[in-house]
Image (tube, rainbow, N blue to C red):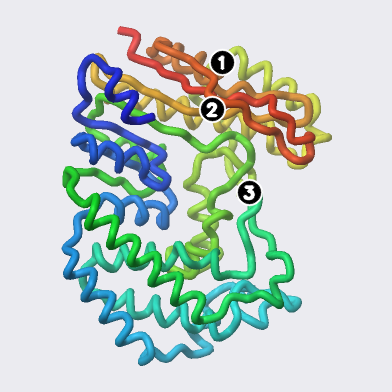
């Protein structure tokens, strides 16, 4: 999609902005196209994943680091104090006879992490850390399902062993090194801003093109999805830090108590939706959902307003957004964002439904929600 958009423009962009960097797909594609990307990402694990993809490496350094890791890992001593730093469900015996990793496997994971943390080369350390993170859920007793995790079927009898983890780690590391060898020739320049995009957007100088897909207003908190990686890789070390990270995310969920004030979102459609949601508030699974929906559009409205001061005169913003639904009330995200964008100095260049999304299990998994590309440009 990024390549197609760039090739369709009359003027080739010099700088591309993605305020919701995620796994870095837009930024990496821009690098291969010879365009300097700027990405913003609030999740520190995903930010490191993006940076590891964008960075340059010496293959000999990676091979040496791999050898150093394999030679040093058995010398690392893990104590009970080390184990106790993590939530009790992470390591056997867990809580109520449930745990994510057996004791032997968790020890081995921490040994690998300790050696990786000792690497002096920050780029190499980050890359190996990301590879380690990519192995955690596959060798755990849980899988990602919907808005969180659930235990695998017959997990107790089918737990991963230390050998399974080590084989997977080395396989993934070798694949990464192979990819770097094959695809490493790309532009070196990039900008990565780590933190809340609502604040970090103020540190962006200017841009010609922005392509992004924000979280959808479906009460889905991606902090939950990456909770295991965030804890084990030491991005968060306490419940307070976890709460702080949640508070820096877009107000698209109700997993943390915070102000849901609406400052920037001016839209007739939004007013209608909020009114309808408040009428059925007692039937919703959380009382803050109507306010959250308004706050979500306020966040995106504020972001678009700040971007309006930085976009080139002939610049373009392409958003891929998805509708949500609560009970019988549909939230037409693209239509509302279009109204907001027009109110703050944009005009619509193109709006196209890309595919149909399913509603939640509670609503029958119907395919009646739109995922839409909304393309706006400065109005003057």
Q: Is residue 323 left or right of residue 320?
A: right
Q: Nearer the viewer, residue 196 or 331?
A: 331
Rendered location of residue 299, percent (x, y)? 49, 32
**x, y (%) of residue 15?**
22, 31
Q: Residues within 10 Å of mark 1 (few under 14, many from 20)?
A: some
The residue under the point 60% across, 24% down is 370
Residue 293 visible at all: yes
Between marks 2 and 1, how big is the CA–CA gap? Answer: 9 Å
Name the residue carrying label 3: 255
Q: Is residue 359 above or below residue 234?
A: above
Label 2–label 1 contact, CB within 8 A: yes
Instruction: Specify few, some or many for label 2: CA neighbours under 10 Å numbering under 14, 14-19, or 20 or more.
Output: many
Q: Looking at the image, which residue is at 49% across and 63% down?
A: 229
Q: Is residue 294 above or below residue 121?
A: above
Instruction: Tell me what residue is drawn at x 58 percent, y 55 percent.
Output: 224
Q: Quadrant of the C terminus?
A: top left
- Mark 2 vs 1, N-terminal side: 1
Residue on which the image places disc 1? 267
């Amino acid at each position: 999609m990024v390549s197609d958009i760039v090739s369709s423009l009359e003027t080739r962009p010099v700088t591309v902005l993605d305020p919701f960097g995620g796994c870095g797909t837009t930024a990496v594609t821009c690098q291969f196209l010879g365009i300097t990307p700027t990405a913003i990402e609030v999740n520190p694990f995903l930010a490191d994943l993006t940076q590891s993809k964008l960075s340059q490496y010496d293959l000999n350094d990676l091979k040496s680091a791999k050898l150093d890791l394999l030679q040093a890992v058995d010398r690392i001593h893990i104590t009970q104090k080390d184990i106790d730093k993590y939530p009790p469900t992470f390591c056997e015996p867990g809580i109520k006879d449930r745990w994510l990793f057996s004791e032997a496997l968790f020890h081995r994971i921490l040994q690998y992490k300790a050696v990786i943390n000792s690497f002096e080369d920050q780029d190499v350390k980050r890359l190996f850390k990301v590879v380690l993170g990519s192995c955690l859920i596959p060798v755990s007793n849980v899988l990602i399902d919907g808005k969180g995790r659930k235990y695998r079927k017959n997990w107790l009898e089918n737990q991963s062993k230390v050998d399974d983890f080590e084989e997977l780690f080395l396989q993934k590391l070798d694949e990464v090194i192979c990819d770097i060898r094959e695809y490493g020739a790309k532009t070196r320049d990039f900008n990565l801003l780590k933190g809340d995009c609502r604040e970090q957007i103020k540190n962006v100088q200017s841009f010609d093109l922005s392509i992004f897909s924000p979280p959808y207003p479906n009460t889905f908190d991606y902090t939950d999805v990456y909770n295991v990686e965030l804890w084990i890789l030491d991005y968060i070390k306490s419940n307070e830090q976890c709460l702080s990270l949640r508070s820096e995310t877009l107000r698209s969920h109700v997993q943390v108590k915070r102000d849901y004030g609406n400052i920037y979102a001016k839209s007739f459609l939004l007013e209608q939706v909020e009114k309808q949601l408040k009428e059925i508030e007692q039937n919703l699974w959380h009382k803050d959902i109507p306010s959250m929906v308004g706050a979500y559009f306020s966040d995106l409205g504020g972001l678009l307003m700040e971007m309006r001061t930085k976009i080139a005169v002939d610049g373009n913003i392409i958003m891929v957004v998805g509708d949500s639904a609560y009970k019988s009330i549909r939230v037409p995200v693209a239509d509302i964002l279009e109204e907001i964008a027009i109110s703050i100095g944009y005009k619509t260049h193109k709006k196209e439904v890309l595919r149909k999304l399913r509603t939640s299990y509670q609503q029958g998994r119907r395919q009646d929600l739109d995922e839409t590309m909304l393309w706006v440009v400065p109005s003057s």
